[in-house]
Image (cartoon, rainbow, N blue to C red):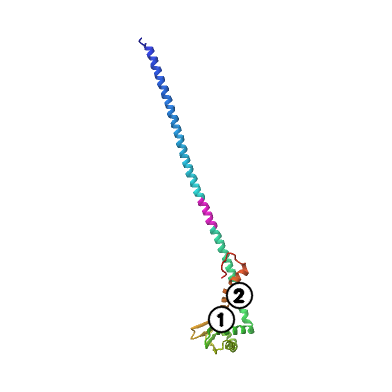
Amino acid sequence: MALSDQDVQKQIKHMMAFIEQEANEKAEEIDAKAEEEFNIEKGRLVQQQRLKIMEYYEKKEKQVELQKKIQSSNMLNQARLKVLKVREDHVRNVLEESRRRLGEVTKDQTRYAQVLEALITQGLFQIMEPTVYVKGKQSDANLIQSVLPQAVDAYKKASGKDVTIQLETETFLPADVTGGIELYALNSRIRVSNTLESRLDLIAQQLLPEIRNALFGRNVNRKFTD
């Protein structure tokens, strides 16, 4: 039985509605799939960037910590150097005060004469030559001359050797030297400095560890005492 135009139109409309429904469902499915894939990709990118940001700030934090440690170490070293400098300055001041007080030895002529005799005798034992020249300050010439016999006698008795010692009368120790003497032999090829300053320097080097301990106490970190 032939369909009427009205029935054909109904079927066509029904088919078009079905096709449109299928298309809408398919479009929704595609949209949903695209949304899901978008969210997955967005989440992946966000997580990737989050990890990069965390890694970046972790690196920055480590750099800051390292910089703090370096700065702290530098400040600690600077503080230690300042302490060491202050201590060394204090030791130097003590030695300078000792040098200043050397002049007091020369004021007591009796005591100073004994010191000169001991310095000359000691110098003779260091040189151990038969002919020796002694040089002192011009202001000490008479005092040195007066103690030469005793120094020679002490040397001869202790060493069993003879010695001739002569006082220099043309050249003298500088005026800024506190006191003491210098001995020469073999045309000045052998020289012994026994000035008060040189003796103080020698004693200071030997006693420097003890001076530090007396002023600041023992340093538990120091392995050696020199």
Q: Is residue 7 visible?
A: yes
Q: Which residues are magenta?
A: 62-72
The quadrant of the picture occupied by the C terminus is: bottom right
Instruction: Tell me residue 225's x, y (percent).
Output: 57, 69
Q: Secondary structure at mark 2?
A: helix
Say which label, 1 or 2, has the lower sequence index.
Answer: 2
Q: Secondary structure at mark 1?
A: strand
Q: Which residue is mark 2?
A: 98
Q: Residue at x 53, y 52 (%)?
A: 65
Q: Nearer the viewer, residue 59 or 109?
A: 59
Determine if the magenta segment contains residue 131: no
Q: Which residue is mark 1?
A: 194
Instruction: Tell me residue 158's x, y (percent).
Output: 58, 86
Main SS of the magenta part reads: helix
Three-letter amino acid code at disc 2? Ser
Three-letter amino acid code at disc 1? Asn
Instruction: Tell me residue 206's x, y (percent).
Output: 57, 74
Neighbor class of circle 1 (other Cα within 10 Å; few <14, some 14-19, many 20+) is many
Q: Is residue 174 visible?
A: no
Q: Is residue 93 above or below residue 123?
A: above
Instruction: Tell me residue 46's x, y (percent).
Output: 47, 39
